[in-house]
Image (spheres, rainbow, N blue to C red):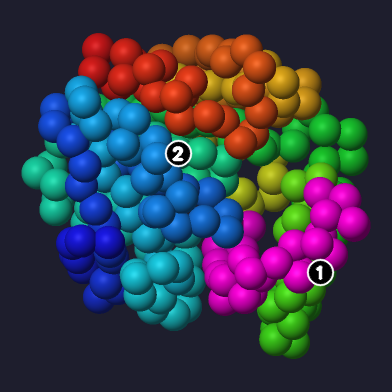
Amino acid sequence: MDDKTTSRDGTSLAYRVTGEGPVVILVSGAMSTGGTLAPLAERLADRVTAVVYDRRGRGASGDTKPYEVAREVEDLAALLAAVGGEAALFGVSSGGALVLDALASGLPFTRAAVYEVPYADHLAGGAEREAVYKQNLDRALAEGRRGAAVELFLRLTGLGEEMIQRARQSPMWPGLEAAAPSLAYDDAVMADGLLPRDRLAAVPVPVLAIAGGASPDWMRQACRDIADAVPRGEYRVLEGQTHMVEPDVLGPVLTEYLTA
């Protein structure tokens, strides 16, 4: 990351600015950094000033304790001030939940888009699954078992045991273990894993909720619910896309919506 700013509680935040045009801050999901969204930022750069950043506890950013979701909302306020005071927001997965919470908190962003926030209302046993995950994650992290925490998250995403064991043997595993404590942060952002309808009703700006056409139906329904819950919501499906959406497919949709 090229630049730094400081959040209200003194946490250093690393960010990078790419492109020219209206500003959009990109918010990553679990087990990722600002670099994860760099390919999307590059895809937007011809018409948009895209800002990627390392959320607290990741990459080159700091991690002041204790963690609270409100501190991550303050991080977005600090970034907004650092890039000129006017910007849109985009968040992917649990990063989308953080975007929606920031909007409901009253931060003055112009509009927002989110991609597949995994609210589990339409997933059979979703609430119970989230509760068990939270309990097991908290225990693993408290005991310092970072590898076990990463495995819990990978299982939650639907990755099979064979793939998890392959991941354990891969060069990326040490980096995943290093980022494991931040899993608790995304878990806190997702709260009980269910759509916060009353909270979303307070979002004052336009929001585009996007889903992949090849993603599970419960994920697409969650996006529909977001669009219905916010007062100025829209819903769109990207045919053939999954949770790992391709920047070349998502980029034009975001550019059109965020520069309208």
Considering only order in the chain, which callout, 1 or 2, is on the residue closer to the N terminus? 2
Dot 1 amino acid type: Asn
Q: Residue 91's x, y, as percent? A: 45, 39
Question: Residue 177 or 139: which is nearer the viewer?
Answer: 177
Can residue 175 be found in the magenta stretch?
yes
Mark 2, residues whose alpha carbon is within 10 Å: few (<14), some, or many (≥20)?
A: many
* Residue shown at the point (57%, 71%) measured from the top left: 175
- Return the residue found at the far bottom: 143
**SS category of the residue bearing label 2:** strand
List the residue tagged with mark 2: 91
Q: Residue at x 33, y 55 (%)?
A: 53
Quadrant in the picture for the C terminus = top left
Which residue is at the front of the view, 222 or 259? 259
Label 2, label 1: how far apart the Cα atoms are: 26 Å
Q: Which mark is residue 136?
A: 1
Residue type, numbered disc 2: Gly
Q: Position of residue 21 (x, y in %)?
A: 14, 27
In this rendering, is residue 187 above or below 62?
A: above
Q: Which residues are magenta?
A: 159-188
